Each structure stands twice: as C-alpha cells, then as structure tokens.
Image: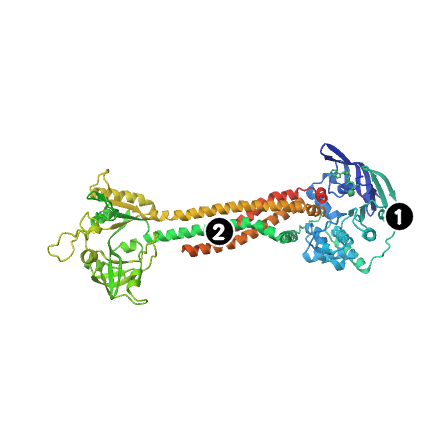
Amino acid sequence: MTASNIIIEVGGLTRTFTVGDVDVRALRGVNLSIERGEFVAIMGASGSGKSTLMAILGCLDSQTGGRYFFGGLDVSALHEPQLAKLRREKLGFVFQSFNLLARTSAIENVALPLFYSDEAIEGAQRLERARAALELLGLGDRAQNTPAQLSGGQQQRVAIARALINGPSVLFADEPTGNLDTKTSHEIMESLLSLNRDQSLTVIVVTHEPDIAAYAGRVITMRDGQIVSDERRASPAPSRPPTPQQKEASAAMTIFHSSRPAKGALAQVSTLAFASMIVTAAVQAIARNKLRSALTMLGVFIGVAALIAMVAVGNGANAAVRKQIESLGTNLVVVLPGAVLTGGARSGFGSASTLTVADAQAIRREAPEVGLVAYLMRQMGQVQLRNQNWTTNIQAVSLNYPPVTNWRIAEGRGIGADDERSGALVVVIGHTVYKQLFARGENPLGTTILVKGSPLRVVGVLATKGQSMWGQDQDDLVMIPFKTGERKVLGVAAPNQPTNLTSLYPPPPNPFNLQPRLTGYVNSIYVQATAQTRIPAAIDDINRILMRRHRIRPTDIKDFDIRNLSQIAETAEGSSKVMAVLLAIVASISLLVGGIGIMNILLVSVTERTREIGLRMAVGAQRLHVLTQFLAEAVLISVSGGLAGIAAGVAISEIIAIFSAWSSPVSLVAIAIGFVFSVAVGVFFGYYPARKAAQLDPIQALRYE
Ligand code: ADP
Ligand code: MG
C-alpha cells in the first residue's frame, strides 16, 4: 500500500463542546487513516464520540484541534463553499433517521444533490441518473412513491441512493440500521457491502451492534473520545449476488461518474436547473401551507391594490381638473363687478354695474401682460319655441368671448363679425336649451325662437361642456351678439344699481321709448394672461388700471373683484389629494405589515425546516444556495400577493371611476411600480430569515428536534 492510497487521515483530532460553563471533550486525540476501498465499522458505547468523529470526517463539523487530510487535502484550510463542494462531490451521507424530504417522490429525493452540482445536468439526465441509483438499490419500481408510502428499509435505501448519486469517494453511514428491524438491517448492510465491492466505494459505518459490524473488513472501537482498538479481518462476501438490473445500474452509475469533468476542468454551473429547483421548491413550500401562505400574502395584496388605486385616483383627479381648467379657458382672469354701497348695504360680488366695455378696452390697451380681453352681459330670461319655454342664462358676448373661454360650435356657425356690427337677430344655443326646446333629433338651425320676447334665428349649437366643478350645468345658456343684447334683447340696469332691483326700481322712462338706453355696462370681463406664469402680473396690471379709472384710493373698498380661474380649479384638486394621501398611507402601512408578516412566517418556516436545511447542506448545498432558496420563497409569496393586488387595484380603480364619473387611467407605470414593490418587499423582509437559514450549522441543523 502506498501513501497515495490513503483517503482519510487524521492526527491528534480533538473536539470540545462548550455547554454553559462545562467543556464536553467529545474527541480527545483521535489518530486514524483509512485507505480507498476499505469498509470500516466504528463501534463503541453511546456517547463515546462516534457521531462526532463522523461529522468531522464528513465535513459537517470542524475539529477543535488536530489535523484532517482528505485525499491529501488539508480540510481545516477550506472555506464554506469549498467544504460544500467537497461534500457534494466526494462524500455521501446516510443517517439513522433517513432525512428524506416529505411529500416528495423517491426519485426526486435521490436527485436532490444534483441541483447543487457544478456540472450542467439536464432534467431528463438528472432523473435518469436518479433512476439508475434507485435501480442499484433494488427500488426501480418505487421511484414515484413518497417516503410515507415506503417502508423503513426502503426509505433508508432511497437515502443511500441519494448519497451515491454524485459518485462519492466515501460513504458515511451513522447508525444506518438503528431504526430498522434485524432482517432489514442485514439487507441494508448487504447493499452497502456490494457497493463497497462493486463500486470500490470506501464505506464507514457507525454501529453498536456486533453482527452489523461483522460486515466490515475493519472494526474500530471507541471509548471516551479515543480509539481503543482497530482490527482488520476478512469481511464476508455478499450472500446475495446482484440481480441483472442491479448489475446494469451499477454499470450505468460507473459511466455517469467517469463522464464527470476532470478535476480542474472548467465546470459549468447548472444555474438553470438550480433556478428551476428553487422555484419548484418555493411553489411546493407555499402549496404545502395554502391558507398560511394566502394570509401571508394579504398585506402585500392590500398594499399593492391601494397603491394602484391611489395612482388611478390621483391621475383621474388631475385629468378632471385639467378638463375643468380647459373648459374655463387657459390662463384666464375674470373681473367681476364688486361690492357697492347701496343705501348703506353692501351687495354681493357681481350684482352691481360697475364695469364697462371701456374698462375692458382700457385693459386690452394698457396692460402689457394681457393678451385677449372678452366681456359679456348676462341675464336670466325666458326662451320660447312653440309651446315650450325654458328659463336660461342669456349671454350677450363680445366676439372673442367663445374662443377665450373654449366654447366650440357643434352644429351650424358661431356669432360672426357681421352679426356684431349689425346687431343681427341671431342666437347660438347651448345643448341643454336645445334639449328643452326642440324634439330629439330635430334640426334647430334656421328656426326662430323667442329670447326674452325678441325673435332670434338659431344659427348654431354649442358643443357641450358638462357640469362645472360646482355642479352647475354649463350648457344651460344661449349666446347672442353683444350689440344685439345691449340694444334689443336685454334691458339695461341703471349705473351702480343692483340688477335684481331693476324690477322694483325701473330705469327712468325713455322719452322716445324706442330702445333701451345704451350704457356700455358689462357683467364680467375675461382677461387672458400672456402665460400661466404671467397671471399674477396681469392681475396687478388690471388692478392698477381699474383703480385709476374708477378713481379708487388704496384705502377704499374696490368696486370690482379679480379672480384667477386656474387657481379656483386647482383647489378642486385638494379633496382628491386627500384621498390619494390616505391611499398612500394605507398602501405603505400594508406593505410594511405585509413584509413583516412574510418575515414572521419565513422565520417559522426556517425553524420547521431546520433538518431539511441541514440535509441540503449535507448533500452539498452552499450557504448561498440555502439563502437563495428562502429568498425565492419570500419573493414568490410577495409577488403572488402583488399580482393579486394589481388585479384588485385595477378593479377598484374601475369602480371608483364609475362612481366618481372620472375617466380611470390605470397606469402601466403604477402596475410596474406595484410589481417592483412586491418584489422589493419579498427581498427586503425575506433576507433576514433566509440569512438565518443559511447560517445554520449543518450538523446542529441535522440534529435539530
Ligand atoms: P456517540 O455518537 O458515540 O453516541 P456523540 O459523538 O454523539 O456520541 O457524542 C459524544 C459526546 O459529545 C457526548 O458526551 C455528547 O453528549 C457530546 N456532544 C455531542 N454533540 C454535542 C453538542 N452539539 N453539544 C454538546 N455536547 C455534545
Ligand atoms: Mg451517535
């Protein structure tokens, strides 16, 4: 025997456990070397240190002192990923309690170590290999059975097949027959013996039963953490020759193992297989606890739903406000007649006659920040056609009033320059007036209607604007040329006299009584600023011009009132903003609570699955693999909740849209943000439990009760 044939060599190996203040010296200087192809049994009383020695030899635990060389490699110099690599490529483990994954088929259990393999192994090849390993252990026909459907002996053979799948150099078995009856125990030992012979596998078995140890060619006895005897002898030949299937499987296994890339060859990591395993494992973990997972998703679900609804509400409100501003006209400032003292009583804004066409013209002429200036005179009055009549808002408007306030013509034509010049008897009607006077579908153009008793010909119908933000019907009006209104249709109030008093105090009788007196008074002046940012400057200009023209001193009460229409519209945004803020709070709190829920459940899951984690590490999973697996589970829970939340959020937005009469722009950006948030919550709150799982000590995790 040459030195190169030695696979395991330890010298002066010690292991001390510190429990509270007490040091338990489980190993007190073990010297041992094992050659390739040996079949070794380790015996000794309970507590003599057998399992401790096995765990160190199997790289599941590390020694306190002494040296350990595996195949000439100094194991104590290796770091975690290299130890994991050593476990998955060179070492196989069989435990007393079989440590199979529950609710997972035998073949999937056997294939488990391949997920962590550095070779790229396709799914089909993986299962083929697992089948060969099962075949080798005489379990070819039980591949689809779950552990619960197998006897103890069969389960242990599945575990042995799993230990063999990566073609290890050494198989460690710590009391593999401890949970089995005598007959089954011997069958297991026969299997191990033939593996030792046929596959020239080094086998190290811990047992305290002499008839089990009798299968080994070498029996080591331990007492109090030391080796007290080491005997070699001829081991018996297997009593049962291998079946033809077993022979075939054995050959297949040998081919698999000889086809693995040579050491040092560039190994391609089987990322894809690992990724699919991780997703499958996460789905299985969630499916195993459906209710628990669903409840865990709830927080993220509500959070994402609220987030999407919030964005939709915000967008809807913005769109509504934009539409309102649009319907008012852009960059508009409106000047209304102000409070005027009438016999000591102040009347309300807009009720007095203080503004004139001349004021409007002065503003147009003198204010540098002003573009268009429109004005109108308005009165409530009756319109009549045949036996239909309707009280509406009669507006005598300047030519540029409709364009400045964004009134459009739906049918016919608008008021033209000729109409204004001649004071033509024409009228443009709003949609509500059309509906009140005309039959459905009737063409109103060319029809003559009575407006405050004057016969006017309908030349156009205005496009609808709908309700104003104060709920007024903006379409309930008729428009006539300003001159027509002033001279022929609307009676004119005396200067500085409230219009609502006109009927009580009629104007002085007109000596010729031919037509109403022309006073040039208007009810409002619409001033368009040159730009949104110039509105304040325009307001200053208007104020200055009107103060001068009306001879108002700075201390006097003004007889006019200037209002910024865009600003008024923007205040309507306020209520929708409150709603959006509330939803944002709900969304963030839910996401936070949802995240904490995920973390909590995952911590429980890590505890529940401690042994599974230990097993995965024993078959070669690196800490990084375990971390990724639990992180994937967290993200899957979170994303499932997030996707459901997106669906609910869209539904909520639609419902809000129906009840608020807003358009509901469900934004793709919001959906994307919702998705990203759910992933982020999963990663952020899943990281701590996943790290906790990854930092478990393999041997302690395996022993966890
Ligand atoms: P065996 O497998 O031979 O029955 P072990 O190797 O399991 O014995 O244990 C050897 C000694 O080390 C025992 O006294 C046991 O109590 C102690 N021991 C083993 N593992 C631990 C541990 N994780 N913490 C503290 N003491 C331990
Ligand atoms: Mg033990």
Q: Could you tell whether 629 is left or right of 245 in the image?
A: left
Q: Quick check: is the Cβ at mark 1 less than 8 Å away from ligand 1?
A: no
Judging by the rendered image, the residue that carries numbered circle 2 is: 308
Position of residue 378 measured from the top left corner of the image (x, y, whole percent): 24, 54
Foreground disc of the pair 1, 2? 2
Judging by the rendered image, the residue that carries numbered circle 1 is: 234
Q: Could you tell whether 276 is left or right of 651 in the image?
A: right
Q: Is residue 263 visible?
A: no
Of marks 1 and 2, which one's residue comes earlier in the chain?
A: 1
Label 2 SS: helix
Position of residue 679 measured from the top left corner of the image (x, y, whole percent): 56, 49
Q: Please state which of residues 189 and 261 is positioned toward the viewer in this rendering.
A: 189
Packing grade of label 1 (10 A; few <14, some 14-19, many >=20) is: few
Residue under the image location 74 percent in, 58 percent down:
142
Q: Please state which of residues 222 and 658 is positioned toward the viewer in this rendering.
A: 658
- Indicate the quadrant where residue 395 lies: bottom left
